[in-house]
Image (cartoon, rainbow, N blue to C red):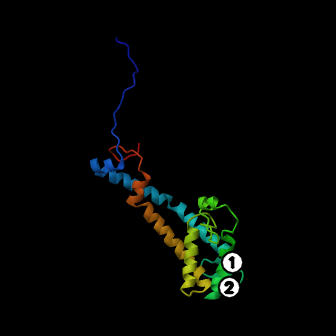
């Protein structure tokens, strides 16, 4: 009887980038993209949490609370302000504490930091991009003649729109290609 050897065997698998997979195996590409969309739907709640945290942070800074039925309560009874009084409220209550202060600095340091004194820091409340979108909506609402209360009551709709846009982008082919640029797939559309 000949001796048995436990020699490892080699199995050859061809791997593809997404561009190559799309050309060689369109069905596998569709399967991989479907998996990506399904995973994006499962992860969508993470973005919704970030957007919701930004909404609550903006309302906290504004001294406001929106109830489940859309009722608004404010600390300083400024809900009826409109026009110049609304702009003054926005500046004094929300924007001024978050403006970049003027500090004497060497010119090369200014260029390096790209500092613009007087501007509101990006994402000032939670560090997430929804902060800026909510501030922009408040500004646009006041500019359109809405009261402070109406501008703040409209913010949950802005958050809902942000959530929908986030999920739509996450499920897009553009995002699929960008997030898997360096990933290799087999001929079944599975990541290797």
- SS for callout 2: loop
Q: Quadrant of residue 38?
A: bottom left
Extreme-right residue of the structure = 76
Q: Are marks 2 and 1 in contact (CB under 8 Å)?
A: yes
**Image spot of residue 41 (x, y percent):** 46, 60
**Image spot of residue 68 (x, y percent):** 60, 77
Observer-nearest residue: 46 or 144? 144
**Image spot of residue 192 (x, y percent):** 41, 42
Extreme-top residue of the structure = 1
Instruction: Tell me the number on the disc at residue 93.
Output: 1
Instruction: Tell me the number on the disc at residue 76.
Output: none
Q: CA distance from mark 2 to mark 1?
A: 11 Å
In the figure, 156 relative to 149: above or below? above
Q: Is residue 154 visible?
A: no
Looking at marks 2 and 1 on the same chain, the residue that comes earlier in the sequence is marked by: 2
Observer-nearest residue: 177 or 100? 100
Q: Quadrant of the N terminus?
A: top left
Q: Which residue is mark 2?
A: 78
- SS for callout 1: helix
Extreme-left residue of the structure = 24
Q: How many marks?
A: 2
Camera-nearest label, 2 or 1: 1
The residue located at (33%, 39%) in the rendering is: 14
The residue located at (32%, 44%) in the rendering is: 187
How crowded is the residue under tag 1: few (<14 C-alpha within 10 Å), some, or many (20+)? some
Decide if residue 80 is on the left or right side of residue 188: right
Q: Is residue 134 visible?
A: yes
In the figure, 125 relative to 141: above or below? above
């Amino acid at each position: 009887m000949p001796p048995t050897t436990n020699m490892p065997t080699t199995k050859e698998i061809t791997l593809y980038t997404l561009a190559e997979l799309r050309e060689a195996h369109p069905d596998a590409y569709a399967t991989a993209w479907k998996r990506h969309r399904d995973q994006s739907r499962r992860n969508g709640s993470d973005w919704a949490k970030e957007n919701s945290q930004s909404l609550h942070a903006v309302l906290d800074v504004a001294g406001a609370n929106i109830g489940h039925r859309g009722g608004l309560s404010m600390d300083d009874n400024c809900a009826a302000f409109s026009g110049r009084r609304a702009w003054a409220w926005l500046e004094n209550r929300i924007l001024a504490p978050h403006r970049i202060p003027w500090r004497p600095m060497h010119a090369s340091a200014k260029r390096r930091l790209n500092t613009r004194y007087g501007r509101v820091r990006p994402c000032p409340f939670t560090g997430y991009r929804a902060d800026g979108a909510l501030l922009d909506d408040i500004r646009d609402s006041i500019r359109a003649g809405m009261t402070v209360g109406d501008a703040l009551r409209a913010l949950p709709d802005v958050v809902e729109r942000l959530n929908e846009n986030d999920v739509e982008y996450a499920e897009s082919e553009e995002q699929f290609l960008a997030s898997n640029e360096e990933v290799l797939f087999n001929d079944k559309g599975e990541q290797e």
